[in-house]
């Protein structure tokens, strides 16, 4: 039986810097309304309803214009809520879908034309055990890669960074742009010298991958200010600032204690510490997402 997640905060901490025009939240999910977009019967968690309209309100609350909706595992391979959101707001939103190996090229082309820029693949396992149900794995990516190359779609990889040391050669030979979720979703105690994290840095430096410097709240052991994530972000930015985007991960699924749900303003304010140069913030919030998500 899945656990019921808490909702996101209604208010956010005031942001300490000016948000540039066309800023993009490059990682978020929407859920519902459930009478129109029911969740998968088999799922790892049960989120509250947070439909497209709530996401747009979230963007306004942090001063952002654009957003990227990623189909969440609670929907399996049902992308309809995301696709309908893109149709309703083609200037503001882009999507990342989930597709199984049998998905036809014509379907992918229709999604691409609708604003879907990539497909998400769930390779996230810890100690060999999958963390989320419904994920589409590496075999599906290998099957879909030829069509993705033809359509210039990227592969968003949900992976534990330590596994990159072994899996990077298999991923890179597919010749599909790679976007690694949440800095590799590794706990801060592992350190930046971890071979998988160093592999991620090399992939960025060589222009062979992108990453999202999102998920500070999931990787940290210092929930108040996420200061233990600073060395990871600095290493990634030093590797290649042109291959980095940022997102809130709104509405923050899989939180069950009220004190743990992150504040989007606090998350955004980490950028003031991580990226003190306004030009660099503009690159990561505006220029880079405009390139990869085709705004």
Image: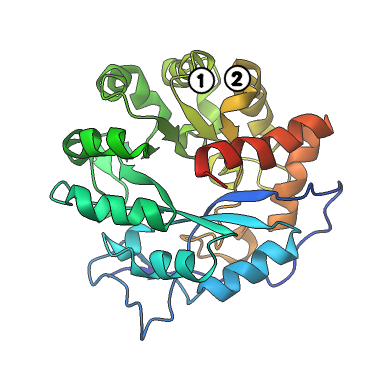
Residue 50, percent from left and from top: 52, 73
Q: Evaluate whether residue 276 shows in this view.
A: no
Q: Sequence-wise, which precedes: disc 2 or disc 1? A: 1
Residue 49, percent from left and from top: 48, 77
Q: Is residue 97 left or right of residue 64?
A: left
**Marks 2 and 1 close (CB-CB < 8 Å):** yes
Q: Secondary structure at mark 2?
A: loop
Say which residue appears at 48% left-offset and 15% top-offset. 198
**Residue 25 drawn above or below residue 31:** above
Say which residue appears at 36% left-offset and 23% top-offset. 164
- Per the image, the residue denoted by label 1 is 204
Say which residue appears at 77% left-offset and 50% top-offset. 21
**Residue 90 drawn above or below residue 125:** below
Q: Evaluate whether residue 216 shows in this view.
A: yes
- Per the image, the residue denoted by label 2 is 240
Q: CA distance from mark 2 to mark 1?
A: 6 Å
Label 1 CA crowd tier, 10 Å (few <14, some 14–19, many 20+): many
* Res 227 quadrant in image: top right
């Amino acid at each position: 039986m899945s656990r019921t997640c808490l909702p996101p905060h209604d208010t956010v901490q005031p942001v300490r810097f000016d948000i540039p025009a066309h800023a993009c939240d490059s990682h978020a999910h929407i859920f519902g309304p459930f009478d129109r977009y029911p969740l998968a019967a088999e799922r790892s968690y049960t989120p509250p309803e947070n439909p497209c309209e709530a996401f747009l309100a979230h963007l306004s609350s942090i001063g952002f214009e654009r957003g990227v909706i990623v189909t969440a595992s609670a929907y399996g391979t049902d992308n309809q809520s995301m696709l309908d959101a893109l149709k309703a707001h083609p200037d503001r939103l882009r999507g990342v879908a989930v597709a199984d190996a049998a998905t036809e090229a014509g379907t992918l082309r229709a999604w691409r034309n609708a604003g879907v820029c990539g497909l998400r693949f769930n390779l996230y396992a810890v100690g060999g055990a999958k963390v989320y149900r419904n994920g589409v794995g590496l075999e599906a990516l290998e099957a879909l890669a030829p069509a993705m190359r033809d359509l210039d779609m990227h592969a968003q990889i949900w992976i534990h960074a330590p596994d990159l040391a072994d899996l990077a050669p298999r991923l890179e030979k597919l010749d599909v742009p790679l976007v690694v979720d949440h800095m590799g979703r590794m706990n801060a105690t592992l350190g930046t010298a971890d071979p998988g994290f160093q592999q991620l840095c090399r992939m960025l430096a060589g222009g062979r991958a992108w990453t999202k410097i999102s998920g500070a709240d999931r990787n940290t052991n210092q929930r108040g200010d996420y200061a233990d994530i600073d060395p990871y972000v600095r290493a990634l930015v030093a590797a290649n600032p042109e291959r980095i985007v940022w997102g809130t991960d709104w509405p923050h699924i899989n939180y069950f204690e009220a004190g743990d749900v992150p504040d989007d303003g606090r998350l955004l304010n980490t950028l003031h510490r991580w990226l003190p140069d306004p030009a660099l913030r503009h690159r990561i919030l505006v220029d880079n997402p405009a390139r990869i998500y085709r705004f």
